[in-house]
Image (cartoon, rainbow, N blue to C red):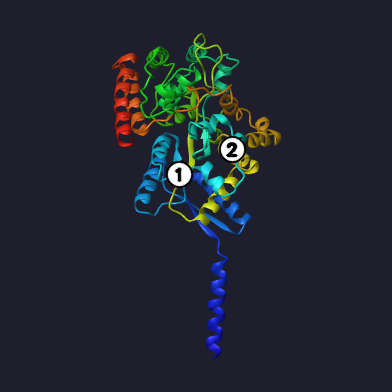
């Protein structure tokens, strides 16, 4: 009898415990290293702030691996509630209408306060539909800037960073004359030297608002501005003004070693440069071609956003909405921005960072924010939305490398990339009609 009573108590306690157990929300992400540790810290802080939900972050590898894993999991009906997807996967996620739960709808359905105007328009525009409704939640957004070696500049008698590409050329010649091996190198060549070049000068990268207005888009990055820029970079490669380092951010090594005095790279590269540079460095806005535009436009973002997947319970979605609200808090966003170098996604996070004196204490960290908020985003500057864009970037990389090696001229290379890129767009369009 005594044992029966004890068993009843245990069962009762077990039932009470399960009744009050937090609803688990799985979040698959691609943040490794220090940023991955920070993601775990953010999730833990949210979990500790309430007792209804428990967010479980799971690292799934790089961006491509994370997105591929999520697609496979969805087909097997084992998908997470939240998945981090890089910006080039946006069109693919949008096309999977039955698989995603649009963030604006999720927040409304869950009764969470959600003011889309509180977010930086240059960031949210990338992840919104034609009605301006946010489909995913921006998380880690960055934009390209120019890093420069102040010590090498001083040695060469250069007092300030170049603002235009003409100045990049003249400054590089002075640097080479002073003994520096190369003027500048670049990371992510398609993103920086074509995609953002186009946005900076408010010229189309493609038709139909760079893909935002429909699937029938065609590439236009073989226009006069883009061809002239790539042709000039080909000349600079031969003279040592520019030195190609690879398709991703391999150029960092050339900057760290002081082989190259300037480096066009993501604003989120700041932390790595600060950690590895043994010299004084500065951060300046991405250069533009003087005479081609009166006032340079905003650059466009890289990075990733958080997508909510279908197939979960109403209670889980309440947890997701609660977590996304927490992520958007000024204090959380300001901390993430200051730690990682990614842009703050809300005006409040930017203002708080400014009030805390972070930008004054860390010169250059505000550059990306200022650059992104230049003017009002246009059809050419709000972002890019193309299917099969991962493959298309590979095609662009091949074409640019053919110019750097001197095999073909810029016009031929970009014409080829446009033709091959359009074929990829048609494949995606056919598969998603």
Residue 431 in the figure: left or right of residue 175: left
Residue 216 image-quadrant placement: top left
Q: Which mark is residue 349?
A: none
Residue farthest to the top, as pictured: 291
Residue 244 in the figure: left or right of residue 349: left
Residue hosting label 2:
337
The residue under the point 59% across, 46% down is 325
Residue farthest to the bottom, as pictured: 1
Q: Nearer the viewer, residue 373 or 254?
A: 373
Secondary structure beneath dot 1 equals: loop
- Residue 59: horizontal and vertical position, in percent? 45, 49
- Residue 117: horizontal and vertical position, in percent? 61, 34
Residue hosting label 1:
30
- Residue 298: horizontal and vertical position, in percent? 54, 23
The residue under the point 47% across, 51% down is 81
Q: Nearer the viewer, residue 52 or 245?
A: 52
Looking at the image, residue 109 lies above or below residue 18: above
Q: Nearer the viewer, residue 95 or 246?
A: 95
Q: Tell me the quadrant of the picture where the N terminus can be found.
A: bottom right
- Residue 311: horizontal and vertical position, in percent? 43, 52
Q: Nearer the viewer, residue 424 or 35?
A: 424
Circle 1: is it few (<14), some (14-19), or many (20+) Cα within 10 Å? many
For the residues marked 1 and 2, what is the alpha-carbon distance in whole angstroms? Answer: 17 Å
Q: Tell me the quadrant of the picture where the C terminus can be found.
A: top left
Circle 2: is it few (<14), some (14-19), or many (20+) Cα within 10 Å? many
Secondary structure beneath dot 2 equals: helix
Residue 38 visible from this viewpoint? no
Contact flag, marks 1 and 2 (Cβ < 8 Å): no
Q: How many circles with numbers are drawn on the protein?
A: 2
Looking at the image, residue 428 lies above or below residue 261: below
């Amino acid at each position: 009898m005594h044992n029966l009573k004890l068993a009843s108590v245990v069962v009762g306690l077990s039932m009470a415990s399960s009744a009050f157990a937090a609803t688990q929300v799985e979040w698959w992400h691609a943040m490794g290293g220090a940023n991955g540790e920070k993601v775990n810290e953010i999730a833990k802080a949210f979990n500790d702030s309430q007792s209804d939900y428990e967010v479980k972050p799971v690292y799934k590898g790089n961006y491509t691996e994370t997105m591929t894993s999520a697609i496979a999991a969805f087909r097997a009906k084992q998908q997470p509630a939240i998945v981090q997807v890089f910006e080039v996967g946006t069109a693919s996620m949008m096309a999977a209408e039955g698989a995603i739960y649009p963030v604006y709808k999720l927040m409304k359905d869950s009764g969470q306060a959600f003011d889309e105007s509180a977010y930086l328009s240059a960031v949210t525009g990338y992840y919104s539909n034609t009605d301006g409704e946010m489909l995913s939640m921006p998380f880690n957004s960055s934009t390209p800037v120019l890093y420069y070696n102040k010590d090498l500049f001083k040695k060469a008698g250069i007092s300030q960073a170049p603002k235009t590409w003409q100045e990049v050329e003249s400054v590089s010649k002075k640097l080479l004359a002073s003994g520096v091996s190369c003027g500048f190198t670049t990371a992510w060549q398609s993103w920086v030297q074509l995609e953002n070049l186009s946005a900076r000068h408010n010229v189309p990268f493609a038709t139909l608002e760079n893909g935002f207005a429909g699937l029938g888009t065609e590439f236009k990055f073989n226009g006069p501005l883009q061809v002239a820029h790539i042709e000039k970079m080909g000349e600079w490669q031969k003279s040592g003004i520019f030195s190609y380092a690879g398709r991703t951010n391999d150029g960092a090594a050339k900057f760290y070693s002081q082989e190259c005095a300037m480096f066009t790279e993501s604003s989120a590269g700041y932390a790595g440069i600060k950690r590895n540079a043994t010299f004084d460095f500065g951060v300046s806005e991405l250069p533009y071609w003087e005479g081609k535009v009166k006032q340079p436009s905003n650059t466009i973002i890289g990075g990733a956003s958080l997508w909510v997947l279908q197939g979960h319970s109403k209670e889980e979605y309440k947890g997701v909405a609660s977590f996304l609200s927490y992520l958007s808090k000024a204090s959380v966003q300001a901390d993430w921005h200051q730690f990682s170098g990614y842009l703050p996604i809300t005006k409040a996070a930017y203002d708080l960072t400014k009030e805390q004196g972070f930008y004054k204490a860390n010169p250059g960290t505000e550059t990306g924010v200022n650059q992104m908020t230049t003017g009002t985003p246009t059809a050419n500057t709000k972002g890019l939305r193309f299917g099969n864009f991962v493959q298309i970037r590979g095609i662009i990389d091949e074409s640019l490398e053919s110019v750097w090696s001197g095999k073909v001229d810029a016009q031929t290379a970009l014409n080829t990339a446009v033709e091959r890129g359009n074929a990829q767009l048609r494949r995606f369009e056919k598969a998603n009609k």
